[in-house]
Image (cartoon, helix red, strand yellow):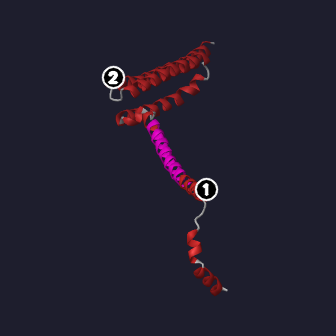
Amino acid sequence: MKDRLEEFVSNHRQDFDLLEPDARLWAGIEKKLDKSRKRRLGFYISRVAAVVAIFMLSFAIQKYYFNHKNPVDKIPELQEAESYYSGLIDQKLKEVRPMLAEFPDIQQELDGDMKELDSVYSSLKEDLKDNVSNQQVIEAMIENYRTRIDILEEMLQFLDKDKEEIPANQNKSEYEL
């Protein structure tokens, strides 16, 4: 069968070369080729756009993270002081809290003072974000911690003194009877 087809094509070759396809047919073929090229181009452009978007998003997240990072972390001396004073304050608070159970008014006053000092410390941190190397802000932050410790130490002295006076008065009254 192949031989017959080949023979037919070779016998009528001139007839095949004379006829050309219609111009509309070529226009349709070209449109399909253009569409497939546009699809490929669109596909590559969308990939490039996705890569650019991911890069920009990761850059924005990294910039946000570093700009909003705790300024205390940027200054090792302040970080060390914060760690030291926080531990000392926690220790003093553990000593004071049980003693304050008998004095709710003093406990409220202490809590109020500590909240006020916390808010001052937070505003100092905000100031430090604006100017990281400002020594005055750093000294004020350390002074804030020292003030908290002073308050807690005074509270401990007051409560210890108050405890010593109560049993002494009770012992005198027992002997006087």
Above or below — where is 149 with respect to 14?
above
User: Residue 24, which numbered label?
Assistant: 1
Question: In the rendered structure, does residue 50 fall within the stretch colored magenta?
Answer: yes
What is the quadrant of residue 125 in the picture?
A: top left
* Foreground residue among 7 and 27: 7
Q: Earlier in the sequence, mark 1 or mark 2?
A: 1
* Foreground residue among 71 and 51: 51
Tell me if residue 45 can be seen: yes
**Secondary element at image label 1:** helix
Magenta span of residues: 39-64
Which of pointers 1 and 2 indicates the residue nearer the eye? Answer: 1
Above or below — where is 68 with respect to 126?
below
- Magenta: main secondary structure: helix
Q: Is residue 110 left or right of residue 127?
A: right
Amino acid type, residue under disc 1 in the picture: Arg
Residue at image x 60%, y 63%? 21
Amino acid type, residue under disc 2 in the picture: Gln
Q: Is residue 60 left or right of residue 142?
A: right
- Counting other residues with Cα less than 10 Å from the Cα at mark 1, is it few (<14), some (14-19), or many (20 or more)? few
Above or below — where is 156 with respect to 176?
below
Question: What is the quadrant of the N terminus in the image?
Answer: bottom right
Percent x, y of residue 68: 46, 33
User: Residue 136, which numbered label?
Assistant: 2
Percent x, y of residue 148: 45, 23
* Foreground residue among 42 and 126: 42
What is the quadrant of residue 80 in the picture?
A: top left
Percent x, y of residue 10: 58, 81
